[in-house]
Image (cartoon, helix red, strand yellow):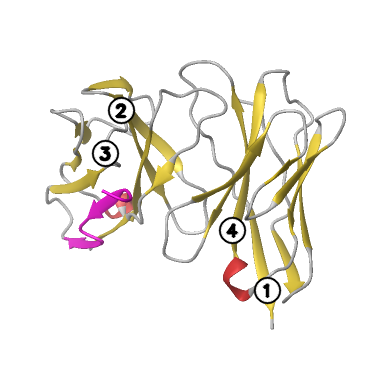
Amino acid sequence: DAKTTQPNSMESNEEEPVHLPCNHSTISGTDYIHWYRQLPSQGPEYVIHGLTSNVNNRMASLAIAEDRKSSTLILHRATLRDAAVYYCILRPDSYGQNFVFGPGTRLSVLP
Amino acid sequence: GAGVSQTPSNKVTEKGKYVELRCDPISGHTALYWYRQSLGQGPEFLIYFQGTGAADDSGLPNDRFFAVRPEGSVSTLKIQRTERGDSAVYLCASSLTPRVGGDGYTFGSGTRLTVV
């Protein structure tokens, strides 16, 4: 499985933008980049995913480096509810591949 | 239903007992997954069902763990002779299509199993 590397933890102030980095230097051409987050006492929740181009949705933006060896999840305006563990996961576009979760980045949002 | 439902939300059992954990996926989702999450770790894959059959059970830690999905909807994870090391949050997820790169999962809130 292609591996990702994320910082163990990050802090942000409320109402400021947050940039969560993910390195995936061994990514292959057919790997999708997925981001999930896990709020306390809940299961992981889908945030966003992409393949090559930057992506935007109502929750976040995903910026993918041109060489695809890294990506950044952008929360445009952090709220206290965004405090969670954020997982960056690579998933091959072939039948039979699971999501493999690493330890993720624990984001703390300060009021 | 609107989301993935897991019951019970909490289960405390004595070492050596048998437990069953239930997952009710989103209606129409053919793919169902079980994960286990220990404190401070990311979820760890256990088993994947496509319809009624277990398409991949490579993550089950040993033969004390077993899961079924007899009618292709609700699934039950069964643990025999529970051990203290089985204590974890057991997560269930479902997806509309089989596992391909762009498809995402919807997770339930999990069952917290504590073996005393």
Q: Which residues are magenta?
A: B1-13
Is the C-beta separation of discs 2 and 4 under 8 Å?
no
N-term mark: 1 or 4 = 4
Which label sits in the foreground, 3 or 2?
3
- Name the mark nearer the viewer: 4 or 3: 3
- Which residue lies under the disc numbered 3? B27
Residues at marks 4 and 3 touching, judged by CB atoms closer than 8 Å: no
Q: Which residue is mark 1?
A: A109
Q: Are marks 1 and 4 in contact (CB under 8 Å)?
A: no
Residue B21, relative to residue A39: is it above or below? above
Which residue shows up at 20% across the image and 58% down it? B8
Pointer 4 chain: A
**Cα–Cα span, label 1 and label 3:** 35 Å
Instruction: Determine whether the residue tagged by mark 4 lies in a helix, strand or loop.
Output: strand
Do the dots labelled 2 and 1 sit on one chain? no
Q: Which mark is residue A85?
A: 4
Q: CA distance from mark 2 to mark 4?
A: 28 Å
Q: Nearer the viewer, residue A83 or A104?
A: A83
Residue located at (62% from left, 54% from top) = A86
SS at mark 3? loop
Q: Is residue B36 left or right of residue A22?
A: left
Are the residues flagged by discs 1 and 4 from a single subunit? yes
